[in-house]
Image: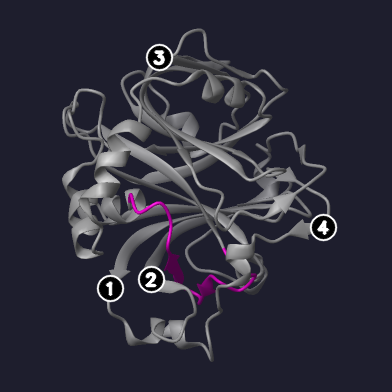
Amino acid sequence: MISERSSSPFHPGELEVQQRAGVGDGVRKRAQVAIRKEMPEQHREFFANLTYVFVGSADRDGQPSASILVGPRGFMSSPDPARLLVRAERSKDDPLSKNLVVGTNLGLLGLDLTNRRRNRLNGRVVSADAEGFELLVHQSFGNCPKYIQVRQNITSNKLCSDKRRRLEFKQLDKPIKRVIQNADTFFVASCTPAYDGEPGTYDCDISHRGGRPGFVHATDREITVPDFSGNLYYNTLGNFSVHPYAALLFIDFLTGDLVHIQGRVEILWNDPRVASYSGAQRAWRLCIEHGYFAQSASIRSGPDVEFSPFTSMTGLWDNGQASG
C-alpha cells in the first residue's frame, strides 16, 4: 500500500498483480471507499480493546520483519482518527526494536482471534521511545474473516530477551519444521521502497494467512505457501512483485513459542504442482536466509480450535509436491 498523499490506494506492484490475476475495476473502485486515510470510530475502538497486535517493519536494507506486541487492554489508543498510540514492552532482540525510528513506516494488523474480526493499518512513526510509539495513519481498512481459526482463552507471555531461550538458524531443523508444518495460521510481513519517502525508507505491511494444518510446506531451506482467494487487493503479492522479500511469523498457540523467518520470495504463477491443491490459485516460495526460534515469547490459547468453513474447503500438499 502507498502513502496518504497518493490518489490511489494501490501502488504499481499491486495493480500489476491485480491485472495479472484478472481483477476488475469494481474492486479498485470499492477500495477507494473502503481504504480510508483516517481510522473510523469502530476501528479506533477495536484496536483499543485488543491485548496484542502484529507489526510489520523493515530495516534500511529493505528486509521485512514480523513482530507481535502485547499489553493490557488499552495499551493501544487513538486520540484522534489520524493517530494511533501503542504503549508496549519490546524485546531488545526483536527486529522491531532496531527498525522503530521516527520517519519509518509500519504495517499493523489488529486481529481478534476469538471472533475472526481483523483490521489493518499502515502509518508513519512520528515519535518513539522505550515505552512505545505514535503512528500517523496513512491507510485504515477492514479485512474479511476468511481462513481465520477461532481460539479462546488467549493469554500473553512476557516477552523473552534471554539469549539462552532464543535459537538462531539458517535452515530448519526437525522441531522448528514441525511447528511450521503443524500450523494452521501464520503472519507475513512485506514491504516496498517508499514511493514518496526518503531513500532507505519502506512502506510496510503485515497480513494473516490460514489453512488446514499442513497447508504450509517446509523443507530444510524453503517454505511454500498456497495463495487462496481473499479480498483481491493483493497487498502481499503486490509487494513481492516489486520487492521480493518477506518475514514469516509462526506461533505455537499451545506453548507460546515463536518462529520468525526471513528470506527472498518467488511467486509461483503457473507451477503445475499447485494445480491439484484444492482452493489454491497460485503459490509463493520463500528461500530461507535467516530465522530464530524464541521459547514462550508470544501469545497462547486453549487447545480447542474452531476452523473457518473456508479453511475446511481447502486442500493440502500431496506427496511432497511442493518440494520441487
Label placed on residue 304? 4
Q: Residue at x 23, y 63 (%)?
A: 22
**Amino acid type indicated by mark 3:** Ala
Q: What residue is disc 1 on?
A: 269
Q: Amino acid at mark 2?
A: Ala
In the picture, the quarter occupied by the C terminus is bottom left
Q: In terms of sequence position, does the residue under pointer 4 or pointer 1 come before the other?
A: 1
Residue at the front extreme, as displayed:
26
Left or right side of 202 for 84: right
Q: Nearer the viewer, residue 114 or 23?
A: 23
Q: Crowding at label 3, few (<14), some or many (≥20) Cα neighbours within 10 Å?
A: some
Q: Quadrant of residue 175?
A: bottom right
Cα distance in 3D space between marks 3 and 4: 38 Å
Are the residues at dot 3 and dot 2 in contact (C-beta closer than 8 Å)? no
Q: Give whichever of discs 2 and 1 has the lower sequence position.
A: 1
Name the secondary structure under disc 2: strand
Q: Dot 3 corresponds to which residue?
A: 82
What are the residue bounds of the magenta stretch? 211-233
Amino acid at dot 4: Asp
Tell me: residue 323, above or below residue 310.
below
Crowding at dot 4, Cα within 10 Å, few <14 / some 14-19 / many 20+, comes out as: few
Give the main secondary structure, helix, strand or loop, of the magenta stretch.
loop
Q: Who comes first in sequence, dot 3 or dot 2?
A: 3
Q: Secondary structure at mark 4?
A: loop
Tell me if label 1 and label 3 are in contact, CB under 8 Å.
no
Q: Which residue is mark 2?
A: 283
* Identity of the residue drawn at 42% across and 26% down: 100
The amino acid beneath tag 1 is Trp
Measured Cα–Cα span from mark 3 to mark 2? 36 Å
